[in-house]
Image (cartoon, rainbow, N blue to C red):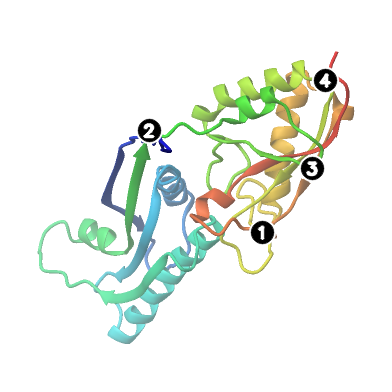
Amino acid sequence: MLRFTFFFYAFYIVSYAQELHHNVFFETDKYNIISEQENSLNTFISSLDSLTIETIKIYGYCDDRGTKTYNQQLSENRATTIKDYLLDSEFSEKQIKVIDGKGELPLNVTVNINKIRKKNRRVEIVVTAKYTSNNIEKPTTQTILKKGVKVGDKVRLKNIYFKTGYSTIMPSSIPTLKEITAILVEKKNIYFTIEGHVCCTHDTYDAIDRKSGLRNLSISRAKFIYTFLLQQGVEKHRMKYVGLRRKHPLGGDPKLDRRVELLITYVGKSN
């Protein structure tokens, strides 16, 4: 009689949705984003990096001055400005479900009129996001590199998160990158190409690096990792870097395409 032994692995998944709001305020008759508001918007965008974005809704508004036709068009232009900014910040067009110019907001007060009008010249961004966590242990980049790699392997730098629209990593990612660097310093027999990727652009375009204004974000991110490794002691002749734009999307959550991978090009004998 055959006896079968079954092993059951229990794990817990915690998932909850949340709705986040952010307002971008505009100057009178304008629909360009001023620097103060851009900094605030970038801070909000960065706060979304750890979340799975389900929907984004964008609503544009105006104050009560101007004709209804003019205000309607201005509110639509403001909403479109924010939509384009989010697309350039590596959000997917599929995530943006609503882009709506609401026109003017009525002024129903007789005091603090200028203050109220200033608040009415805005775009409201409503993000529905889901946070999911589980206790399943998955191999880290560190364990993969320690175990051993072969030519042709692609090792993703897990838990290395970039600021949205920028080539610099989040401060919380620095300790993990230092651990990876220490392993690469030790394993002098591993040669590799650092491949940078971006998400959510049209076709195979690269994304815009907000620091430089150039459409070369994937190569900028790869170069950031290259420079960091070089400064920490990884030999220059073992590395090179390339930007692959959006040529190789993973097909899952768009934020996962905002990534850097190591393509192993040569593995020599260990010392």
Asked if the residue under mark 4 is in contact with the one under mark 2, i.e. CB atoms within 8 Å, the reply is: no
The residue that appears at 39% across and 36% down in the rendered structure is: 6
The residue that appears at 59% across and 45% down in the rendered structure is: 166
Judging from the image, what secondary structure is the residue with disc 2 in? Answer: loop
Residue pointed to by mark 2: 135
Q: Which mark is first along the chain, 2 or 1?
A: 2
Task: Find residue 85 and report its horizontal and vertical position in percent.
Answer: 50, 60
Judging from the image, what secondary structure is the residue with disc 4 in? Answer: loop
The residue that appears at 29% across and 45% down in the rendered structure is: 15
Vertical placement of residue 143 versus 27, above or below: above
Q: Amino acid at mark 2?
A: Asn
Q: Which mark is first along the chain, 1 or 3?
A: 3
Number of residues whose C-alpha sits closer than 10 Å to that of mark 4, classed few (under 14), some (14–19) or many (20 or more): some
- Label at residue 246: 1
Judging from the image, what secondary structure is the residue with disc 1 in? Answer: loop
The residue mark sitting in front, 3 or 4, is 3
The residue that appears at 48% across and 59% down in the rendered structure is: 86
Residue pointed to by mark 3: 152
